[in-house]
Image (cartoon, grey):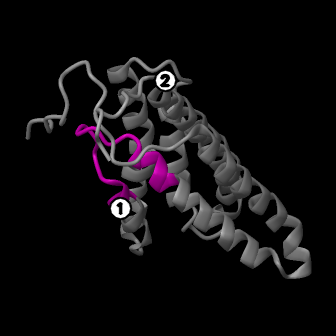
Amino acid sequence: APAPVPQHAPGQMPVYQTSYTPEEFNKLFMWWWILLAASIPGMFIFIGGPLIIAAIVIGYILMYKYWNQLQDGYQKTTPGKAIGFMFIPFFNLYWQFIAIHGFAQNANAYADRHGINMPRINENLTLTQCIITCCCIIPLVNILAGLALLVIGIINFIAFKNASVAIANHKLQHAQPAPAGAP
């Protein structure tokens, strides 16, 4: 199937329904990081569970926003599908290759299309994360795989945030003013 046609003139930035500020990404990421870091010692005083759940929720909110700002007609999926399909048991083992590895591919391609100077997301590392996640269902292997997944997942999530901040900055710098008389 041919690639969808973007809803803007070639070489022009598309009009976005929703745009995010770099501060929004940084603030949400900071809360995700605090909750994740607090959940580890929190396990010893029985509050780690709720903290990790809160970190996961914020992580999914961030992933939705990361995907949402890339939507220009060339993406593999929508933000809703990217996140929603991750909640389907067993299917999510496949879908993470779209939602996580696909995000890296789509973000890098988006930056190339729009001439955004941003740190490239390491697509091999996101692929590794997806493969290691699949290894987490294997008994005994899951302990070592889980530790590797924690480290690689954090590295990738930092890269996702940095790329999204660069894209948000680019959009702010190239935003076109609303026409006179527009609401």
Residues 23 and 3: in front is 23
Q: Position of residue 123 (x, y in %)?
A: 47, 34
Q: Is residue 154 left or right of residue 45?
A: left
Q: Which residues are magenta?
A: 63-82
Residue at 49% across, 30% down: 172
Q: Secondary structure at mark 1?
A: helix
Is residue 35 shown above or below 115?
below
Q: Quadrant of the N terminus?
A: top left
Q: Position of residue 74 (x, y in %)?
A: 24, 37
Q: Secondary structure at mark 2?
A: helix
Residue 54 lies in the magenta stretch: no
Q: Position of residue 109 (x, y in %)?
A: 36, 28
> Which residue in the protein does label 1 denote?
80
> Which residue in the protein does label 2 denote?
173
Q: Quadrant of residue 133?
A: bottom right
Residue at 71% across, 69% down: 52
Residue at 61% across, 62% down: 58
Residues 30 and 24: in front is 24
Residue 74 lies in the magenta stretch: yes
